[in-house]
Amino acid sequence: MTQNAQRQAALRALLADFRVIPVLTIDRVEDAVPLAQALVAGGLAAIEITLRTAAAVEAARAIAAQVPDAIVGIGTVLNARDLATAREVGARFALSPGATPALLDAAAQSPLPFAPGVGTASEAMAAMERGFDIVKLFPAAQVGGIGMARALGGPFPDLRFCPTGGVSAANAAEWLAEKNVLAIGGSWIAPAADIRAGAWDTIAARAKAARALW
Ligand code: 3PG
């Protein structure tokens, strides 16, 4: 198997096992481990730590080192440097809101399973040209929601989506029922305010409810 095929197969298997991925914005490193423990306890072991805060990198490192059952993904990967950071902290996968040529080229050279972000047909084509057939549909609700995923399924029947942006407890089941949706992501399971409040039981309960969806 080529590196490209291995990377895509690994991502496909991961998203089949964990169809709901909490998108996490962590402000304080000390919240990282109890947060990841709550999510794992609720059954959502694959998590996306967004590179949006000063604490994100150390938070990801702490989870990778101290919560062995968590499968750490790095999100908000904007360039090759972020992708290198994801590998360096021990991430098992990475995601981006977009798909610039430079990022796609870097990701194509990396063994790290990676889902670029697409919101248009041309972005989907750019991703597929470089071997990425599993993409984040972002921002999913704003680019057309389930109707957009279905419409892109016409010309791109082999493309698979992980929608994020506007996915919630209210529409999660509907998204998961779509045949070209492998997994969904969102902040609703562990919103930043709940993380700041240390509401681990609430987060674990939301994770458990989400885990019951597949
Ligand atoms: C993001 O990258 O911000 C995610 O898509 C989360 O979006 P949400 O807050 O609408 O779930």
Image: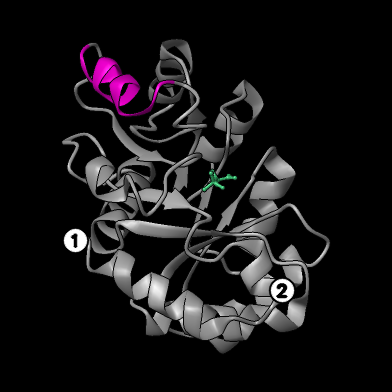
Q: CA distance from mark 2 to mark 1?
A: 29 Å
Q: Which residue is at the front of the view, 161 or 141? A: 141
Query: In the displayed structure, does residue 66 sit left or right of residue 16?
Result: right
- For label 1, count other residues whose C-alpha is less than 10 Å away and answer few (under 14), some (14-19) or many (20+): few
Give the residue displayed 65% in from the left and 73% down from the top: 195
For ligand 1, give the image quadrant.
top right
Q: Which residue is at the front of the view, 46 or 43? A: 43
Q: Position of residue 145 (x, y in %)?
A: 37, 28
Label number found at residue 196 = 2
Q: Earlier in the sequence, mark 2 or mark 1?
A: 2
Hey, which quadrant is residue 163 in on the image? Answer: top left
Label number found at residue 214 = 1
Q: Is residue 44 visible?
A: no
Disc 2 element: helix
List the single residue furthest toward the front. 170
Q: Position of residue 192 (x, y in %)?
A: 66, 63
Q: Position of residue 205 (x, y in %)?
A: 39, 78
Q: Is residue 21 magenta?
A: no
Hey, which quadrant is residue 135 in on the image? Answer: top left
Give the residue displayed 74% in from the left and 52% down from the top: 52
Label number found at residue 131 = none
Dominant secondary structure (helix, strand or loop) of the stretch shown in magenta? helix
Q: Callout 1, which amino acid?
A: Trp
- For label 2, count other residues whose C-alpha is less than 10 Å away and answer few (under 14), some (14-19) or many (20+): some
